[in-house]
Amino acid sequence: MNVSVEVTGNLLEYLDQKVKKGYYKSRSEVVRNAIRLMIQKDIEEQLKLKGLDPETFKEIRKETSGELLEKKFPKLSKNNN
């Protein structure tokens, strides 16, 4: 899905500098990454409101994901040991 956004002045210069310096391939990529960071920040704020440390939550999530993968694909975990 495409979305058009009007960006002017200093914001446009900022986007162009990120692309010019090679950090991103296009203006769109800069904007997409900015949105991802905004989402991440919102999630971290929600975790904090619920009394959860974002870093602790990430570690718990990694452990839980690993356990679920091992249960679903036991052959994978046996090959890695």
Image: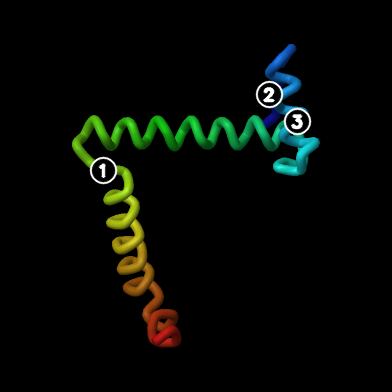
Q: Residues within 10 Å of mark 2 (few under 14, many from 20)?
A: few
Residue at 24% over, 30% down: 49
Secondary structure, mark 2, is loop
Residue 3 numbered mark, or none: 2
Q: CA distance from mark 3 to mark 2?
A: 22 Å
Residue at 65% over, 30% down: 31
Name the amino acid type tagged 2: Val
Name the amino acid type tagged 3: Gln
Q: For the image shown, how many numbered marks are present on the structure?
A: 3
Secondary structure, mark 3, is helix
From the image, tell me which residue sits under label 3: 17
Q: Residue 16 location in percent, x, y?
A: 77, 28
**Pointer 1 or 3: first along the chain:** 3
Secondary structure, mark 1, is loop
Q: CA distance from mark 1 to mark 3?
A: 34 Å
Give the camera-side residue of 12 and 78: 12
Q: Residue 11 location in percent, x, y?
A: 68, 18
Q: Residues within 10 Å of mark 3 (few under 14, many from 20)?
A: some
Do the CB atoms of the residues marked 1 and 2 lie less than 8 Å apart? no
> Farthest left residue?
51
Query: Tell me, what colour scheme is on the image?
Result: rainbow
Q: Residue 59 occupies which quadrant of the picture? A: bottom left
Looking at the image, is mark 1 or mark 2 nearer the viewer? 1
**Pointer 1 or 2: first along the chain:** 2
Do the CB atoms of the residues marked 1 and 3 lie less than 8 Å apart? no
Q: Quadrant of the N terminus?
A: top right
From the image, tell me which residue sits under label 1: 53
Q: Residues within 10 Å of mark 1 (few under 14, many from 20)?
A: few
Residue 74 numbered mark, or none: none
Q: CA distance from mark 1 to mark 2?
A: 34 Å
Residue at 51% over, 35% down: 37
Looking at the image, is mark 1 or mark 3 nearer the viewer? 3
